[in-house]
Image (tube, coloured by chain):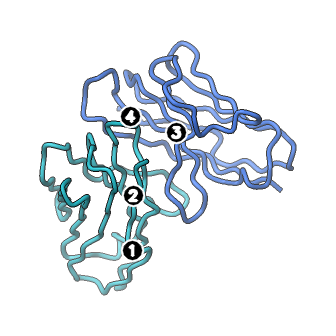
Chain colours: A cyan, B blue
Amino acid sequence: KQEVTQIPAALSVPEGENLVLNCSFTDSAIYNLQWFRQDPGKGLTSLLLIQSSQREQTSGRLNASLDKSSGRSTLYIAASQPGDSATYLCASFNTNAGKSTFGDGTTLTVKP
Amino acid sequence: EAGVAQSPRYKIIEKRQSVAFWCNPISGHATLYWYQQILGQGPKLLIQFQNNGVVDDSQLPKDRFSAERLKGVDSTLKIQPAKLEDSAVYLCASSLGGGGGTGELFFGEGSRLTVL
């Protein structure tokens, strides 16, 4: 059974800082790894998706990496802004199970 | 392109009452998912449809929850009778499916259920 862990559960940083969010998974037989953003009371917004054959994806100030052998993915946010404050979740689509498993998220607060 | 639509956004009911949630996926998306998200946790899959067939309902509490996807487009999720522990956000997601695409999930805004 795939397990996905995100540590820390909460993170607070000053504006302008670069930061890394972590996601680890137990089963490396994944089809893809997807990062989401969730604002309070809202649904999940897709940020980046990394296919199993890829090592990283970039979108603006965001960069996500994938290392299947170590069961880890990271989301790098450059020059953080107060508008980046939200909960960030990762989900791995496990090939054997045929479905995605989510972590519990990291709640990020960027202070002005 | 229209996103995943869900309704209602909010619902408050008494325990033992019934409730239904509706989802319209992105046009052309064959795979539809219902997730339950309890405060502070990640979404947990309840049921997955491929077109109008059920692919995975192993985590669906079938004694009280039911879901259908008639004609392979819209879907409804019903809870009857509701329990206090059913208070959560019910998220609908869709993906291209059918063996093609990247498997990227697209979510609706969710339906927040409060059971009193």
Separation of residues labelled 4 and 1 (CA atoms): 30 Å
Residue A46: horizontal and vertical position, in percent? Answer: 34, 49
Q: Which residue is mark 3?
A: B92
Q: CA distance from mark 4 to mark 3?
A: 17 Å
> Which residue lies under the disc numbered 1?
A108
Label 2, label 3: how far apart the Cα atoms are = 20 Å
Q: Secondary structure at mark 1?
A: strand
Task: Give, as a three-letter code, the residue at label 1.
Answer: Leu
Pointer 2 chain: A
Q: Amino acid at mark 4?
A: Gly
- Residue position for label 4: A98
The residue positioned 48% from the left and 51% from the top of the image is A43
Quarter occupied by residue B39 = bottom right
Q: Amino acid at mark 2?
A: Val
The percent coordinates of residue B23 (x first, y second) are 56, 32
- The reply to whether callout 2 and callout 3 are in contact (CB within 8 Å) is no
Q: Residue at x 79, y 53 (%)?
A: B115
Q: Is residue B99 left or right of residue B32?
A: left
Q: Residue at position x 60%, y 45% from top?
A: B90
